[in-house]
Every structure is written in structure tokens, then in C-alpha cells.
Amino acid sequence: MLTLFTSCSMNKMFLQPTKIPALAKKVTLKTETDTTVISFTPETHQPTFLNFKNDTIDLGYTVESVIFKSENGNKLNGWFIKPKNEIAKITLLHFHGNAGALFSQYQAITPLVKKGFQIFMFDYSGFGFSEGQATRENVLTDGLSALDYIKSRQDVKGTKIMLYGQSLGGHLSAVIAQQREKDIDGLVIEGGFSSYKDIAKNKGGFLGKLLVKELYSGETSIKNFHKPVLIVHSSEDKVVSIALGKKLFDNANEPKEFYEIKHPHIYGLQFYADTISQKIKDMLDKP
């Protein structure tokens, strides 16, 4: 019984989704400085962003809500985000972390839209408006299906495709990159961990590592990926140790770069968007 309880506890550490009821009309995001209300249309869940006065916020980019089907049969909700005043040459497929949903994760990646990238982000099964159960198996299937979806879009054809994974999504992105290398042009991992067993040990000691099944490993996968890799990790990260990001880097093939930053877990783009965006562009410009 103790082992079963502990195993369940470890699994909850990996996936802590925020589920939104299918008929939900809005969510409210509060920070120390402001309040944002996101209202949703029925069926498509198209978001509109409002301030505390109920005025529409001009984000500086467009957000298109889409529903697409995962190979596991679940209907997933994604947002395709584009700059307003330019046609993007690079498409980022974003994999978010283990908690929350689109409405709480989008600000971690949208600084790159202001640098000219278009971004597709989505909720895994059991997150947000997405159907199904939040399991590690579904997370992988959903990620592969999201790549299939963006490759079917006309506004993605002709652009470079990069995977950008943060935290749990960083680990996931390494696995998807290896499985679908021919379909992408490079990989960016921010605040990612090397393997499920490593993060379990990091959080729960030897017993945590012992109880967790690997299923799939970023550390193993990245050894077999041969396109450009950028790994971004903060020395002040208290959620995923920088040692686990460096372990991913050590196992990656050239061309690769490790960019060490400051500030909390996956806050890189809030403080270093200029540098990270330039590094991504430079990666793709190299022969």
C-alpha cells in the first residue's frame, strides 16, 4: 500500500493539470499589478483578453483557438499565435510544463511573438479544454499529433519549424525531436530535465527514482538527434536543477549551445527574449 501511494504521489508530481469545464465562459488571471479576464466563445474556445475595466486588451499579436485530434482520439485545444505586422519565417511548436493550461502558460512563450516568430501551443490531454486523461503516454502522443497538425497548415509551409519545450515540455521536446527529426529544423529546451528518473531522484531521493518508470527519456533521445540544439537554463532554477539541463546538453550532438541565465524557472523569455530569439535565428542561419 505504501509503494502504491508513493507511486501515485510521484506521478502527480509530473502532471498537475488545470482542467477547464467545456462550457466555461471565462477565467481570471490576477497578478500583483493587474487583472486579466480571458473570455471564451462556445465550441471553439476562442479567447478574448479583457482588463479589469472589461476593455479588450491589444496584445500586439493574434490568437486563433483551434481544436485538433490527437492520435489517442482526444480532441485537443491549441492556440496559434501570430505577429500582427509581419509574416513569420519561423514557426515554434511549444510544449508547456506539467501544470496549469494555455491561459496560465501563454505568457512564458509569447515574448518571442514580438520578435517575429509564430507559435503554436496546445494543452495536453486532460489540461484546459483538452479531452482525456493527463498521462505521460498521452503527453507524448499529443506532442507528436501537434507536430502533424502544424505541418498540415498552409501558414506553416515554407517556414522553419523549431520545437521549444519548457520544463516537462523541454524533456518531451527532446523525445519528439529525435522521433521526428526529418520534420523539424532544430530544438530549444528551457528549464528541461534529463529523464523522469533524474527529476524523481532530484525531488524524492533514491526511492523516488526507484519507483518511477522511465517510459521515454530526453537524455537518451537527444543522443540520437543531429540538428541544432539550444539549451537555456537558469542557475537560480529551484524547480529543475541546472545540473539536469547540463546533463541534457552533455548528451546532445553538435551543433549545440548552452545558455546559462538567471531568474526563476522558465522565466528566460521575460528577461532574455532578445538574446534567445537571436540565438534561434543564428542556429538556423548556420550551414
Image: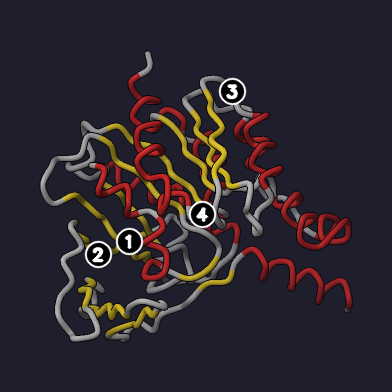
Q: Position of residue 267 (x, y in %)?
A: 48, 55
Q: Helix, strand, or loop for circle 3?
A: loop
> Sequence order check: which comes first, mark 3 or mark 1?
1
Q: Is residue 56 above or below residue 142?
A: below
Residue linked to disc 4: 266
Seen at 55% across and 40% down, the residue is 174
Foreground tag (3 vs 4): 4
> Sequence order check: which comes first, mark 2 or mark 3?
2
Left or right: where 244 falls relative to 114: right
- The quarter holding residue 182 reads top left
Q: Position of residue 157 (x, y in %)?
A: 22, 35
What's under tag 4, amino acid-wise?
A: Ile
What's under tag 1, amino acid-wise?
A: Gly
Seen at 69% across and 37% down, the residue is 247
> Sequence order check: which comes first, mark 2 or mark 4?
2
> Sequence order check: which comes first, mark 1 or mark 4?
1
The Cα–Cα distance between marks 1 and 2, rounded to whole angstroms, is 6 Å
Foreground tag (1 vs 4): 4
Is there CB contact under 8 Å for labels 1 and 2? yes
Is there CB contact under 8 Å for labels 2 and 4? no
What's under tag 2, amino acid-wise?
A: Ser
Residue linked to disc 3: 253
